[in-house]
Amino acid sequence: MSGPFEKSPEVSGGLGSRLLGRKARGAAARDIEALLAGSADLSAVTVERIAEVASRHGIEMARLQSQCRDLYRRYVEFCLVDHSLSDAEVADLAHLRQVLALPDAVASEVHEEVACAVYGAAVQEVLSDHRLDPEEEAFLTRIRDDLDIDSETATKALEEGRRKARQSYLSAVVSSDDILVASQEVKLEIEGSSEDSLEGAVVDALQEAATVLPGLKRVKLAALEADVADGDVARWHVKLKAVLDRR
């Protein structure tokens, strides 16, 4: 099957492999992955076939829990690319837990980790413009519900997303000549443009800044440029400077 697993050459077992311990576990894990990758359907892979691979390397399945956890996590991530689990994917995951001899507690832990990571990535994407409109909020709510993420975890993810988005914005607009690290003031350079008017360019520059930096009260027009086409202004470009008090 195609997806998160790669088909790699089998590594022979034997005494040398048995004595190497960690290498034997790695070799067994690679062969198990190759078995999964080479199967057209996960349901065709049986507990007996997986156990046979482990036995060939002199390894008990209990000693492969870490490697099996990684394989299971990768399949969960593969299934959650579209932010939801279909009935077929739920069935495949249940079968994979069984053949990999993965305890329910470990599988639940993996699900929670991956679900939170997927939700966090969706939050980052939505907040890239520092705004959360009704459609985007509904999108995040659907993902939260589909992934069975509790409201407290979702709220923390939103707060973290806003913090990271703000940091990203500040790193882009903090003036390069702001070298007074100990100062309580941060110098900002904000750019905007508009095809309609100079005022529209200023509004474009301030739209994102006002959302990220609610304490911003005054800016100074530092630079003004215009693209010209056939003797008319095709687009206005402005650079605004501002000082933000850190306190």
Image (spheres, rainbow, N blue to C red):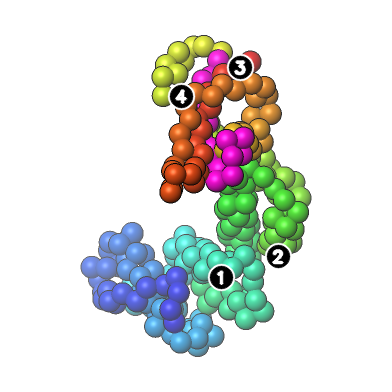
Q: Secondary structure at mark 1?
A: helix
Is disc 3 in contact with disc 4, using a CB cutoff of under 8 Å?
no
**Callout 2: 10 Å neighbours few (<14), some, many (20+)?**
few
Q: Nearer the viewer, residue 130 or 46?
A: 130
Residue 138: horizontal and vertical position, in percent?
Answer: 74, 58
**Quadrant including the N terminus:** bottom left
- Residue occupied by mark 4: 175
Q: Residue at x 33, y 73 (%)?
A: 57
* Amino acid beneath label 4: Ser
- Residue occupied by mark 3: 245
Residue 62: horizontal and vertical position, in percent?
Answer: 49, 66
Residue 173 visible in the shown view: no
Residue 147: horizontal and vertical position, in percent?
Answer: 68, 62
Q: For the residues marked 4 and 1, what is the alpha-carbon distance in whole angstroms?
A: 43 Å
Q: For the residues marked 3 and 1, what is the alpha-carbon distance in whole angstroms?
A: 46 Å
Q: Who comes first in sequence, dot 3 or dot 1?
A: 1
Q: Nearer the viewer, residue 154 or 19?
A: 154
Q: Which residues are magenta?
A: 185-200
Q: Secondary structure at mark 3?
A: strand
* Amino acid beneath label 3: Asp
Q: Who comes first in sequence, dot 2 or dot 4?
A: 2
Q: Which of the numbered marks, if any, corresponds to residue 79? A: 1
* Amino acid beneath label 1: Cys
Q: For the residues marked 2 and 1, what is the alpha-carbon distance in whole angstroms?
A: 12 Å
207 drawn magenta? no
- Residue occupied by mark 2: 146
Q: Who comes first in sequence, dot 3 or dot 2?
A: 2
Q: Who comes first in sequence, dot 4 or dot 1?
A: 1
